[in-house]
């Protein structure tokens, strides 16, 4: 059985594709561009895990400065998470963040696929990872992953974003195993950041010795 959000997103994708093939007016292309607020409305809720997941996915879209811009909001979501908030209002400036037609359709199909797979593979288990006492830990984890997303690392958004997507899904589906996977992906992101930083330091030192030698 498909997840209700997956069905809703799939129907929206089919409708968008039909409008793209048979535009009714010259403004059809504008109507096909989805904003973050539109995607949130399709979810039917503005819960914190959904927002964390959506913002993390947006950082992977090849839009200049998107990761840098969104990382500040993700840090704020980490703070709300640690405080036990279940939902937050989406700021207007963030809600107006809009995808082009191509990425709007890809996002609808991709999110529908993601929820469909999560509905099949994830289930309530390992509840200790999702206990209310772990909220402060996960709030700090969100802030750390957002900080890595902020850094200008080559492909540096991939692992921290994956960690946050798994965190959002694990919390929504009450699956501690998904939260464990989120921790593993985040640990990989931390290791990559440290390794890249060490390479930069070594190259800087060698360059300095070459200039002063």
Image: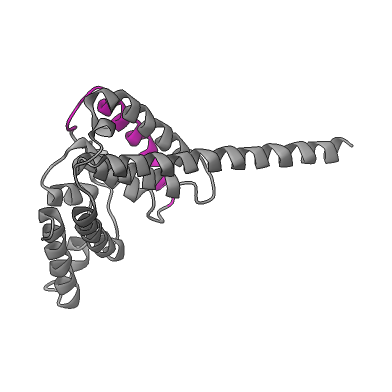
User: Looking at the image, which residue is at 24% across and 54% down?
Assistant: 121
Q: Would residue 68 be seen by someone viewing this image from the given angle?
A: no
Residue 81, horizontal then vertical, whole percent? 26, 28
Q: Is residue 69 magenta?
A: yes
Report whether 148 appears left or right of 174. right
User: Looking at the image, which residue is at 34% across and 26% down?
Assistant: 137
Report whether 19 appears left or right of 55. left
Residue 94, horizontal then vertical, whole percent? 27, 41
Name the image quarter holding the C terminus: top right
User: Looking at the image, which residue is at 50% across and 38% down?
Assistant: 190
Q: Main secondary structure of the magenta part?
A: helix
Rendering quarter of residue 69: top left
Mark count: 0
The vertical placement of 50 against 1, above or below, is above
Compare residues 190 and 90 and report the one nearer the observer: 190
Point out the stretch of residues depicted in magenta: 64-88
Rendering quarter of residue 1: bottom left
Report whether 30 appears left or right of 209. left
Rendering quarter of residue 141: top left
Residue 30, horizontal then vertical, whole percent? 21, 62
Q: Residue furthest right?
A: 213
Name the colour scheme. Answer: one colour
Q: Is residue 175 magenta?
A: no
Compare residues 184 and 140 and report the one nearer the observer: 184
Compare residues 88 and 4 and report the one nearer the observer: 4
Q: Residue furthest bottom?
A: 22
User: Looking at the image, which residue is at 23% across and 51% down?
Assistant: 35
Report whether 24 appears left or right of 154. left
Q: Would residue 17 be seen by someone viewing this image from the given angle?
A: yes
């Amino acid at each position: 059985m498909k997840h209700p959000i997956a069905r809703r997103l799939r129907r929206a994708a089919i409708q968008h594709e039909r409008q793209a093939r048979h535009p009714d007016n010259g403004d059809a292309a504008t109507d096909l561009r989805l904003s973050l607020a539109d995607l949130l409305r399709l979810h039917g809720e503005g819960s914190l895990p959904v927002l964390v997941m959506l913002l993390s996915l947006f950082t992977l879209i090849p839009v200049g400065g998107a990761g840098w811009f969104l990382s500040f909001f993700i840090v704020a979501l980490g703070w709300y998470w640690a405080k036990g908030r279940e939902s937050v209002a989406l700021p207007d400036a963030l809600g107006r963040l809009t995808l082009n037609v191509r990425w709007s359709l890809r996002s609808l199909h991709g999110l529908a696929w993601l929820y469909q797979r999560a509905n099949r593979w994830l289930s309530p288990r390992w509840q200790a990872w999702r206990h209310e006492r772990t909220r402060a830990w996960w709030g700090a984890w969100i802030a750390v992953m957002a900080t890595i997303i902020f850094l200008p690392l080559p492909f540096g958004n991939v692992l921290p974003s994956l960690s946050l997507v798994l965190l959002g899904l694990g919390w929504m589906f009450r699956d501690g195993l998904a939260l464990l996977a989120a921790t593993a992906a985040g640990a990989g992101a931390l290791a990559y950041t440290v390794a890249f930083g060490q390479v930069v330091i070594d190259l800087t030192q060698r360059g300095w010795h070459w200039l002063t030698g």
